[in-house]
Each structure stands twice: as C-alpha cells, then as structure tokens.
Amino acid sequence: MIGAGYVGLVSGACFADLGNTVWCADKDKKKILQLNNNKIPIYEPGLKDLINKNYSAGRLKFTTNLSLAIKNSDIIFICVGTPNKKGSQSVDLSFVYKSIKEIAKFAKKKKIIVTKSTVPVGTGDEIEKILKKKKRNKIEIISNPEFLREGEAIRDFRYPDRIVVGSNNTKIFKTMRKLYLPLINKGSKFFTTSRRGAELIKYASNAFLATKITFINELSNLCEKSNINVEDVSLGMGSDVRIGSRFLRAGPAYGGSCFPKDTKGLVSTGDKFNINLSVVKTVIKSNQRRILLHTKRIEKIMESNLKNKKIIFLGVTFKPNTDDMRDSTSLKMIPFILKKGANVEYYDPTGEKSEFKKLKNCKFNKSVKNICKKADLVILHTEWDEFKSLDFKKLIKKKNFKIFDLRNLYNFNEMMNKKIKYYSIGRPSVN
Ligand code: NAD
C-alpha cells in the first residue's frame, strides 16, 4: 500500500488479516515511526487491535522505504491523497504521479499497480504513458476504487456491497478475484469493467450520494417553513425501494474528505470532456449555500446578538467515529461565530484540533459535562453516541440557554416538554 492514511492503513490491515503479507509505505516519517511503535495515527474503531494482531504475526509491515516495499510486492495499491488543486475544482494528481515514478524506478519484475485512490477518468491512461516513457511496459495499471466509509471502515472493507475492478486486460481480473475471494465468498459482488469505467463509477457514486443529501437538505428548508417534519418525509420517501432510506437524513452541509472534493472533481472531468454536469454543479452550490444558511440561522436564534455569548460545539468532525476534520462544516461555522464577537468552546471525543488552535476566543474543553455549564447556545454538530443522553437542564446553569441540533439527535417533543428553547433541522420550529 503506497500511502498509509485512512484508506491505505485500513485496507492494508484488512488485507493482512486475510493472510497476505502487506507493506504499508508512507513518506511521512512521523506516521511510520508511530505505527512501528504501536501508535495509530488516525482514529478508526477497531483499527488498533487489527493492526496489533497482524503486525505481531509479521504479516503487516510499515516503512518509509518505498524501494523495499515495492521490491517485495506483486500488487501495489496507490492509496495517496487526491485533493482538489488550490483554488480550483480539478484534481491534484501530483501524489499519484510521484508514487508512479517511484514504482517505475524500483520495480524490477512484473507488477500490478492498482489505483485505490479516487482518480478522474483517464488517469490510468496517463499513468500508462508515464510507465511507457520509463520503459516499464511489464507493469499493469488497473483501477479498484475504494468505497469504505470512515468510522465504519473495517466493516466496509470486509463486507463491501461490491468490489469494482477496471482493467483493459481481462486476464488481470483472475488475479484480483483471487485476492478478494474471501470477501466474494461471503457474498460481496465482484464487478469488472473497463479501467475508465471503474474510475467513473467511484465519482458517480459519491456525487449521487451527495445529491441525495442535498435534495433532502433543501426539502428540510421547505419543511421548516410549511410546518412539516422532514423525518416523516424521509421515511415516507425512503420506504420506496427505488429510492431507499439511506443518505436521506437532513442535516448540515455535507463535508468530509470525499464528497466535497469528488463532486468538484467530477464537474472538472465533465468540463475536460466538454460535458456540462449541471446537476452536480447545482449540488455543489446548494451545499455551499447551506453553510451560510446555518450561520444565518445561528444569528437568528441568538437574536443577532452573539457578542460575548458562550457558544458550545459538541463534536467538530464531519461525522462521528472519526477524527477527520477535512472539509468539516465546523471549520467555516466557528470562524463566522467568532467574527460576531462570541466565545466558542468545543468538545470532541477525538480531542483537540490543530485547525482551531490559532483562533482567538476558541477553546477546547476535554469534559463534555463541564463545557456545557455556562453555555448560552449549544450547537450539536456531530452525532456521537455519547451526546445522545445528555440532560441539558441539569448540565447548563444559565436560565435561557438554547440548543441548535444540526443532526436532529434529540426528541422534539421531549425538548418541548422540558421547555427547552430547541431548534433543529426541517422540523416545526418553536418560534
Ligand atoms: P490520507 O491523506 O489519509 O492518506 C494519504 C497518505 O498518502 C498520507 O499518509 C501521505 O503521507 C501518503 N503519501 C502521499 N504521497 C506519497 C508518496 N509519494 N509516497 C508515499 N506516501 C505518500 O488520504 P485517504 O483519506 O486515505 O484517501 C486516499 C485516497 O482514497 C483519496 O484518493 C481518497 O479520495 C480515496 N478515498 C478515501 C476514503 C476516505 O474515507 N478517506 C474513502 C474512499 C476513497
């Protein structure tokens, strides 16, 4: 695995657990040092035990020495980041191409290179050109996009709905099928297509899920104005098997390391081929507007008076069970609130975040109970289980505190019965 991040580390540990010998190579010395000293650089449930087990068994190795990892491997998975280029929607493939050049340098015999990283249509073709230039014609380049979700990554790796493999050389399918056989035998679908087809399937899947979220988010705005509970709408719609209930929960704008960048990446691929992907473009715009909408809502809830108010964030990551802060909506919401003169304190089960360290009047508190004491407004940003049963009436000492629940985690009627000033998403409002 080239790249020991959320994808490379989880996939590496899981492949090792299936009995393979896996080398995880990363250029980040600190990360590899941590891993070789039994410290896991990311938070992912179950990952520590899985790594320990396979590391002790000698099946999982961590190194910064790419040459060593490449020489010792038959199949090389590219798992490096593919962010958007700064100030642009297009995809920065420099990490991918750098790894390819390293592989070309060190690979002495036949190898299969697999792009697990999310890469735009035609990247495999570009890689092939690079390899040809370096006279490395024996290296096969195929696509096997990853669909795991952070927070559920190990389960997702072990029980994927489908394994997508794209290659223009159909002989490769046999090797990849053999590698994935333990998962196929448990019921996962093994789906083969062209290399470009596999590359597009990944972007299409993420853009479609982002569209579903954005659709229900927009409907939640209508629900708020028309006195309807959006959760009833989600249930009523989602019960139709053609629609399905997942990714139909209204909440904040979508964030995280994939949807924001992949929707943009897909639009830029469309542009490259002169195709106007207008639906996806609208989704991106709507999602950006949603962050603004929520910051305006916070101002309204606080009656345009945020100065010196104590605003508490419960959770700051883009979703629970991960420490990943990439494109989390809290990164935009917190600076906005601070600009209005408020003091922000946040608690996150995965600890303090470097992203907020330099912000004046923004503090981390490591106790979820203490943090609430002096709150004027509590913003439930991320729905961790540990927030589900908080008794705000007991925790908060201020009389007129308010709760803004971005995830509809709390029961509306219970909040009303307790006479709490409670605001949520797409539900009839108290004011
Ligand atoms: P990440 O940033 O967590 O990890 C990438 C790792 O690659 C880093 O540790 C970095 O140091 C390393 N790296 C970069 N260049 C390198 C090089 N030349 N040699 C060795 N190591 C190098 O990224 P991630 O979240 O694991 O995502 C990786 C890819 O998988 C992306 O394309 C992403 O879109 C895709 N993906 C991510 C997820 C997810 O949930 N995170 C899910 C599916 C697909």
Image: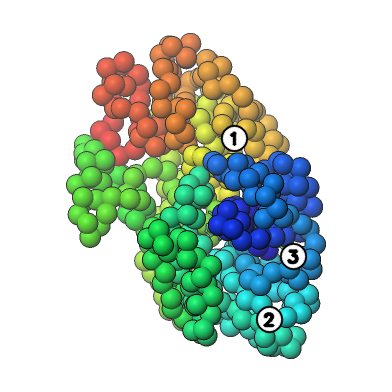
Q: How far apart are the two marked residues, 2 and 3, measured between alpha carbons?
A: 14 Å
Q: Nearer the viewer, residue 212 or 13?
A: 13
Looking at the rendering, the quadrant in which ligand 1 lies is bottom right
Q: What is the secondary structure assignment of the residue under circle 3?
A: helix
**Residue 282 in view of the camera:** no
Quadrant where the C terminus lies? top left
Residue 107: quadrant of the picture = bottom right
Q: How far apart are the two marked residues, 3 and 1, measured between alpha carbons?
A: 31 Å
Labelled disc at residue 69: 3
Q: Of the residues shown, which amino acid type is indicated by label 3?
A: Ala
Q: Nearer the viewer, mark 3 or mark 1?
A: 3
Residue 70 lies left or right of residue 330; in this view the side is: right
Please provide percent x and percent y for residue 409.
37, 32
Please provide percent x and percent y for residue 129.
65, 86
Residue at 22% over, 56% down? 241
Q: Earlier in the sequence, mark 2 or mark 1?
A: 2
Q: Of the residues shown, which amino acid type is indicated by label 1?
A: Thr
Residue 258 lies left or right of residue 127; in this view the side is: left
Other-residue count near label 2 (Cα within 10 Å), few / some / many at <14 / 14–19 / ≥20: some
Q: Nearer the viewer, residue 396 or 76?
A: 76
Q: Which residue is mark 2?
A: 110
Labelled disc at residue 350: 1
401 is higher (above) or lower (below) than 51: above
Residue at 47% over, 61% down? 182
Residue at 21% over, 50% down? 239
Other-residue count near label 1 (Cα within 10 Å), few / some / many at <14 / 14–19 / ≥20: some
Labelled disc at residue 158: none
Q: Earlier in the sequence, mark 3 or mark 1?
A: 3
Q: Nearer the viewer, residue 354 or 153?
A: 153
